[in-house]
Amino acid sequence: MGGIGAPELIIFLLVILLLFGSTKLPKLAKSLGEAQKEFKKGVAESEAEAKADATRPAAIEEEKVTMTQSQLDAMLAEREAQARRNSPPSV
């Protein structure tokens, strides 16, 4: 009860050959190779981005903006009125 031996591997390759055909196997191998290259490229880019993020200085803390409930209500009412003015008239 070991791993995959030579006879199992040959049978597996024959089944793949029957399923995909001899003309599509090179195309399949090429697309798998391209996908592998793209994956490795993406991994390398993400690692480079992570290193760049680690070397950047800490982000400047943004100033928090606060407003009262009445100011928020007034702003929302103004936006609703403007949206009504800009919307086409209903027939």
Image (cartoon, rainbow, N blue to C red):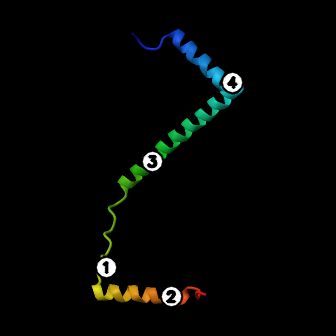
Disc nearer the start of the sequence (4/1):
4
Identify the residue at image location x=34%, y=64%: 59
**Mark 1, other Cα within 10 Å: few <14 / some 14–19 / many ≥20:** few
User: Is disc 3 placed on a helix, strand or loop?
Assistant: helix
Q: Position of residue 2 (x, y in %)?
A: 40, 11
* Residue carrying label 2: 84
Counting other residues with Cα less than 10 Å from the Cα at mark 2, is it few (<14), some (14-19), or many (20 or more)? few
The residue that label 1 is drawn on is 65
Residues marked 3 and 1 touching at CB (< 8 Å): no
Q: Using a 10 Å C-alpha cutoff, classify the residue at mark 4 as few (fewer than 14 neighbours), some (14 to 19) or many (20 or more).
A: few
**SS at mark 2 in the image:** helix
Q: Label 2 vs label 4: CA separation?
A: 64 Å
In front: label 1 or label 2: 2
Task: Give whichever of discs 4 and 3 has the lower sequence position.
Answer: 4
Along the viewing direction, whichever of 8 and 65 lies nearer the viewer? 8
The three-letter amino acid code for the residue at tag 3 is: Ser
> Please, what secondary structure does the residue beneath circle 1 have?
loop
Q: Nearer the viewer, mark 2 or mark 4?
A: 2
- Mark sitting earlier along the chain (2/4): 4
Q: Splitting the image into 4 quarters, where does residue 75 fall?
A: bottom left
For image coordinates 52% across by 12% down, the residue present is: 8
Residue indicated by mark 3? 46
Mark 1 or mark 2: name the one nearer the start of the chain.
1
Q: CA distance from mark 4 to mark 3?
A: 37 Å
x and y, in percent, of residue 83 in the image: 50, 85
Q: Amino acid at mark 4?
A: Gly
Give the mark nearer the N terminus: 3 vs 1: 3
- In the image, what residue occupies the spot 59% across and 86% down? 88
